[in-house]
């Protein structure tokens, strides 16, 4: 499967074409809608006030409720757009945003309204594509789940199993420890009150992957495949598998996961520092990674920047509707990216 | 350019085919040999005692000292191999290594001697390919350098500029602060004495990249392209751009890099939390990332594991020649991977 | 640029996502509509009676009349569908069609109405994508044109230059010799009267390509790139460059195109048997190829086939609206495919 | 599997890296050597007098006689090179060759000796790669065979079944009808006597492919996949599937292959105009195609051309050793290309 996202924040619609979908999947659209609702803003004070129905219209690839094997195209309309917000500041490159590099890259022709094609709004069709991928994986006994692992330095409990992540998915604020979740919310609201934003991290697990998928080689190793999908999610700036950056603090005797033969004859590891991958190949343990997301660049505070048209220094005060934090909304997005990556890894 | 590595640790040779090399580069083979020597083991107590000449034999793609535009194939012979070391333990899956997943993936047909195709020895032809890439970049005023940023929790000073990294390259142990370097060496030797190994991290910078390379989309964004190359390096388990995992501790007002018009009229940022990339596109600041490497899995200590043939629990005591740390040898390897990634990003 | 077509003959719409479009093209939608009208059916007795407005709705990638560099998505609605026509015969594999292999490939889940995703209707969004490609090429002085070279054994005059093909594009029946065109039309109508169909061939030229594009290697040679695009057009079964199959009747002394230095100092060939390509690389002469299209498989005559549900022999008499010939409608489609191929060849 | 050829006619060696080879194939090197010998020149008056041992040296990917799943690299040394032959004429672009476009493409840095990387010598490692592919296919009951279908207008009998092609493979001159073969040889020798060369065509069949492989979409359709491999073979200028260019002379009622249920319950066609492919998907009938090869451009006759260094008109008389025809030597090469294509089509 290959996906191609299209659309802009303030264009008529965003959408996705998913090529290579296996035929015969009875698509559970309600499950997809559920993931879309987890991503949707406007539910509480932690997110932007923009409200979108996010109803996917399927243009192709689905017939009598099943995937046909032909490319699947889903379109989600944009309705709650206020483009006027952006005219005033269109020449002021927002720090932390892609405005300046996009201006160079696209010669000033990019759609500047609401971040255009760079907008987090593009993650809605990505969640749609990931929803299809999740259902294909579930047919094979593979499940993907995630939780907020950190927000502004407040850490959630570590991931343990698939059941706890499934419970997370039903929560308005997907953390394992609601106590830590309350602290995180507080950190978000505090930032919001100060016209600021916060960053965080998401830990994700793919459960049920068989051992033996991947390769050590470029373009075919499990970490490389996953990272390609994860870094395509806006705001992701770091990706770490298993013990991740903590490997730099460890000795081999700690980091090596001892193997044993389980009661059912399968080979398992006593711990999972490797995050389910050795030498680029899955080892049958859960594939676990953490992705770090930068704080939302759009903040109300006065910032120093440049005017791209006048090519001179300037100051910027953004109004408009912004997310003080996108990490909680990004949880289903990273699940989607991971599900698509798992499909590629398995040759689905 | 695309590269394909081939070879096994104890086969006749390792090598690389590099397709799409621009014609007309006058290849400085001494510069490539210098990087190969930085990677080579056997120089001191910090590395395995295996000694290899690592002289690249060029089979194609070079004519009268210049690249021809045809695929460039370089072969490096294996000479100092002691395969007998591996026969005794060939059925014992080494914890932390790919032995078990490779056994599943390749049905037991993989070359088990010295790690076979999974061996760090494959990084020699990768350094060759990266050496070609570096010279292509240098023609465009782009330079790649790296240093050890952490070993077993000991941190080097942070990267500042290209000159200091160039000085690093000449060092036996490539750190910015030799004082910190001494602590790191001590940590390595201590681990070695205890028949153990240590992990670490490498920070790398690509200097001189123009603004406007990359795209926000899957498969074309700068972070995704780089991560694909970096995770293809054995032992790399985490990749972080700019402020990286520290973004999870930050507010937007700290993380946003304020822009200003420089004296020469160019647009620059006052800090570089973004690591030179916004929205998947380079912004003209140095592209900076950190890669974390797990501790060498091969350690002398007794470890618990399984016998893959008998499918029963077992204990393992490795003899043979092992690296107590690969981080210092991996510095030119990550430079090579970064140089190849930069070429892809720029369409070279 | 990469394109992904989606849609089915009797679904809500067909469309295309075009990734990697250079920013800043002022898209001439009327030129695109003109090519769509050249492809459209329903104009005369030579084509199916189905009538479609074929108005492209652009969902993304265009802002203030210019391409933005973000993926360009165009959707064309299906309006004149009569699905009832297909229910009666849905289990009868139409000879010459993909019904049987698609049944195996997609496990019976494919959309069978009107050929589903296999329908020639998918060539409408392909013409859209090709229209964008043509305009990008025209900016560089490169032009693509085609004419019917054969229908049912009646041959048009051979292609000479770009001007005559441009004149062809304005014709209802795009041939160089209207006399031969009249014979061809007669052959089509005769077949139609006998509830049959006819095949033919299209000759296409790409004018203005610079010398030096392509490579001899797999995946990068000019013929390979073009053929990939051309064989993706339904009904195309043969592709020949330059003298094509006539090379099998020739000697080297006839086939070799003698070179000379032209008055303007450029190097040109005295004839163009090579079709503008030597060793997989363009030589500056027009890139010329001929594509052969099989006769429309949908014919009214009684045919022998199998019932896929009952797995037994059967007879089939198709009603519905069919094209007695698709060659004349396919001329702008092959131009579109060639324009997209030329863009890939040039790295646009 | 992906293959990358490397090497030049007069460099130290030619070779191939084959990535993604399934592990566990017990490689029959004698079978590969047999195909290499079918391709080898120097056996009789019909080919160049250059003699090469063509013994493949395997550098990687094979262990204890079986493929390991790691990249397979084979190198074939060049021994019988006479570079002096080429110095005299190095600035004279040989008509029909890639000399001029390569000069533009590679800025004059290409290896001009013996055609360099453009040389037919590169088909030796291609035959090696195809030999591996053939053995992988044979494990699945799939066989690839070919014969000369035309030389200088003399046609062989049409292909009927796999057995007759297998018999062909053992022949010095691989035709079905030895009578026609004698005529062809005469045509070759006549051309040779006149310091000229002849072109021809090769018909190839892939037998035993299951129905249901491929897709109608770009990059995934059977014809597109095959054509990509076939046009990467030097001298191939046309590729036609099934009835091929004859479709332009046919009616639908002739071209449609009627289906029936065979005695064993399988669905088959009564004829095979489709060449085993409908809508880009295999239909279970033999996949049949014909590839046309241009006459060898290297001829002894005086030719008009240009001097690339002086940029002036010139005359050229080639000495050196040339093939008056390459079609008979190309038979195993096209089998190799077809075998690699079939592997891609089947996801091997």
Image (tube, coloured by chain):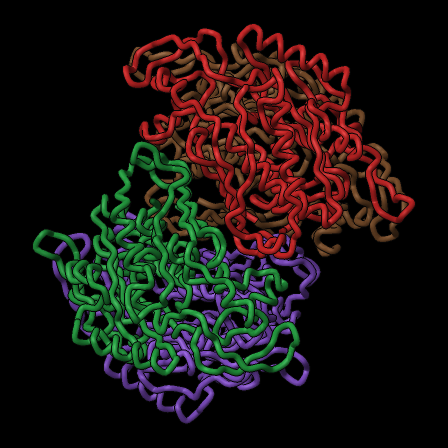
Chain colours: A purple, B green, C brown, D red
C92 shown above or below D315: below
Q: Residue furthest left?
A: B263
Pick the front one: D337 or C20:
D337
Residue at the (50%, 41%) spot, across then down = D75
Q: Residue furthest bottom?
A: A179
- Foreground pick, B71 / D344: B71
In the image, taking residue A201 as reference, residue A126 lies left or right, namely right
Residue C15, percent from left and from top:
54, 48
Q: Nearer the viewer, residue C310 or C331?
A: C310
- Identified at 33% across, 88% down, the residue is A186
Residue D300 to residue D178: above or below: above
Place residue C41 in its image quadrant: top right
D279, A212: nearer the viewer: A212
Q: Quadrant of the C terminus of chain C?
A: top left
Q: Is residue C19 above or below residue A289?
A: above
**Which residue is pictured at 46% across the width and 71% down the height?**
A334
The percent position of residue D124, horizontal first and vertical second, equals 55, 34
Residue that appears at 47% across and 13% down: C271
On the rendered structure, is A93 left or right of C324?
A: left
Q: Is residue C179 visible?
A: yes
Where's residue B304, x and y in %? 53, 83
The quadrant of the picture occupied by the N terminus of chain C is top left
How many discs mark residues in the rendered view?
A: 0
| As drawn, A9 above or below C25 | below
Res C173 visible = no
| Rendered location of residue D101, percent (x, y) | 39, 25
């Amino acid at each position: 499967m290959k996906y191609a996202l299209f659309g802009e924040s303030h264009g008529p619609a965003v959408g996705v074409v998913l090529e290579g979908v296996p035929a015969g999947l009875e698509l559970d659209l309600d499950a997809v809608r559920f993931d879309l609702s987890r991503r949707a803003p406007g539910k509480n004070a932690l997110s932007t006030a923009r409200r979108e129905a996010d109803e996917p219209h399927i243009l192709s690839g689905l017939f009598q409720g099943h995937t046909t094997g032909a490319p699947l195209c889903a379109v989600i309309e944009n309705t709650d757009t206020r483009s006027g917000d952006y005219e005033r500041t269109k020449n002021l490159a927002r720090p932390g945003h892609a405005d300046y590099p996009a201006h160079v890259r696209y010669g000033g022709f990019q759609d500047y309204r609401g971040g255009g094609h760079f907008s987090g709004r593009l993650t809605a069709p990505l969640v749609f594509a990931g929803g299809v991928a999740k259902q294909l994986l579930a047919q094979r006994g593979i499940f993907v789940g995630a939780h907020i692992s950190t927000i502004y330095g407040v850490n959630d409990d570590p991931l343990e199993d698939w059941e706890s992540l499934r419970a997370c998915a039903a929560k308005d604020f997907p953390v394992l420890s609601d106590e830590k979740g309350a602290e995180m919310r507080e950190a978000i609201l505090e930032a919001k009150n100060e016209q600021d934003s916060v960053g965080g991290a998401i830990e994700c697990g793919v459960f049920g992957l068989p051992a033996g998928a991947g390769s050590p080689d470029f373009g075919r190793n499990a970490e490389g495949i996953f990272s390609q999908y994860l870094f395509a999610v806006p705001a992701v700036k770091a990706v770490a598998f298993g013990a991740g950056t903590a490997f730099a603090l460890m000795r081999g005797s700690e980091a090596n996961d001892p193997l044993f033969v389980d009661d059912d004859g399968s080979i398992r590891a006593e711990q999972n520092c490797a995050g389910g991958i050795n030498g680029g190949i899955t080892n049958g343990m859960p594939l676990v990674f953490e992705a770090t997301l930068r704080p939302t660049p759009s903040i109300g505070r006065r910032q120093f920047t440049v005017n791209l048209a006048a090519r001179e220094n300037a100051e910027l005060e953004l109004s408009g509707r912004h997310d003080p934090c996108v990490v909680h909304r990004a949880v289903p997005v990273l699940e989607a990216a991971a599900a698509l990556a798992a499909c590629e890894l398995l040759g689905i």
